[in-house]
Image (cartoon, rainbow, N blue to C red):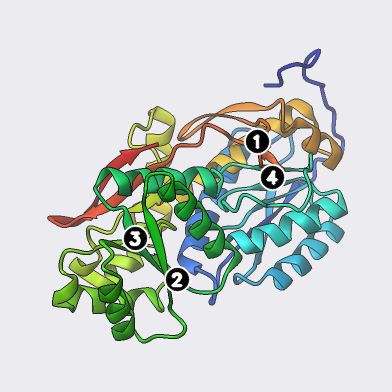
Amino acid sequence: MITGEPGPRRHTDDTGGPIRIGALAPLSPPGWAEAGRHLLAGLEVGVGEVNDSGGVVGRPLELVVRDTAADPLRASAAVEELAQLGVAALVGEYHSVVARAVAGRADALGLPYLCSSAVLDALTDQPTDRVARLSPPQSRGWRIYADHLLGEGHSRVAVVTQPSVYWAAGTRVLRDHLAAYGGTVDEIDAGALTPAGVCDALADRRATALLLLVGHPHPAVPIVRAVRRDRRLAEVLIGAPAGQPELASWLTSLGPDGAGVPFLSYDSDRLGPLGARVGTALADRLGEAPSFVAFEGYDTVAVLAEAMRSYGTDRASVAASWPHVTVEGTRGRISFSRVPGIGVWQWAGAPVQVVDRDPAAPHRLRVLHRG
């Protein structure tokens, strides 16, 4: 429903044609295609349910999917194409640097964009009313992760990194938050060292935790294997705040070595009836347990459909709906507000958890800390 308005506008539509929604996701390398597959599954389950219930103002939703392959230039070109195809709005994307390119181009073209799963705080250069986001901003999630490290006694932390705006932003969040409690963050350049060299550097720094701010599966998987086999580092915690261990390929690649690696999850272990029902539908579609990314995809469609039903299906009406729309999602009630330091409409109540795979049963996830 819409709040703060005289009431929802009633619509009539004589065309009966589908409402086209541009959907962006990394579906091929070098993008994290597994995350893209989960995101797309969530979007598709959401669209299927909307259409089975009669669509939006009597019209079905139709996803027009484009693979970004984690390439900002390719994503920007896709936004241009989708705008010309007449989509009413854009949804999706997982990689933060790509979502930033999408948000900027969509804003310039007057396209509303609901970002599903990217967390970089600076999603746009300037504040905009056209962009909204479901996933929590990086500064919030990574501070919660730092709190977990401190609570477990890890104040001397090393990060192994690759060049990226996203990794650099995460490192700043960790360093600033840990420094307030007397902690330190040392950087190790993944591009300059072999996995064995990373182990040597880690031993020299005497850090008690190593965080993987690198791509998956390479170089993350070889680094984890090397650290696990280095007797000098037997007591070192390996962490992956960006969430690499969430998806099944992590376990397939690493087996027991991939357990006990805490990561950020934007899921809830207290799902209500809607979340449980959608979780079953997502598992059936994916053939495996759905990640939080799949739930983000579903919730994206739930929000967009409600916005269109209540406020209008044209681009301007969708963009104007962000501060007013509220809907029950799989992981809580969703509404958008202005969050200090964030230039887009933000779901401030998105759940944040620190989770790992249980060493005693690596297929099972354990909640270690709730934000």
Residue marked by disc 1: 340
**In front here: 263 or 53?**
263
In the image, taking residue 209 as reference, residue 294 lies left or right, namely right
Q: Nearer the viewer, mark 1 or mark 3?
A: 3
Rate crowding at label 1 as few (under 14), some (14 to 19) or many (20 or more) other CA atoms within 10 Å.
few
Q: Amino acid at mark 1?
A: Pro
Residue marked by disc 4: 61
Looking at this rendering, what residue extends furthest in the front direction? 182
Looking at this rendering, what residue extends furthest in the top direction? 6
Rate crowding at label 3 as few (under 14), some (14 to 19) or many (20 or more) other CA atoms within 10 Å.
many
The x and y percentages for residue 198 are 33, 79
Residue marked by disc 2: 214
The x and y percentages for residue 57 are 75, 31
In the image, taking residue 310 as reference, residue 245 lies left or right, namely left
**In front here: 30 or 25?**
30
Q: CA distance from mark 4 to mark 2?
A: 37 Å
Q: Secondary structure at mark 2?
A: loop
The x and y percentages for residue 170 are 51, 57
Q: Nearer the viewer, mark 4 or mark 1?
A: 1
Q: Nearer the viewer, mark 3 or mark 2?
A: 3
Q: Earlier in the sequence, mark 3 or mark 4?
A: 4
In the image, taking residue 228 as reference, residue 156 lies left or right, namely right
The reply to whether callout 1 and callout 3 are in contact (CB within 8 Å) is: no
The reply to whether callout 4 and callout 1 are in contact (CB within 8 Å) is: no
Q: Nearer the viewer, mark 3 or mark 4?
A: 3
Q: Earlier in the sequence, mark 3 or mark 2?
A: 3
Residue marked by disc 3: 157
Q: For residue 290, say whether it is visible.
A: no
Q: Is residue 198 above or below residue 160?
A: below
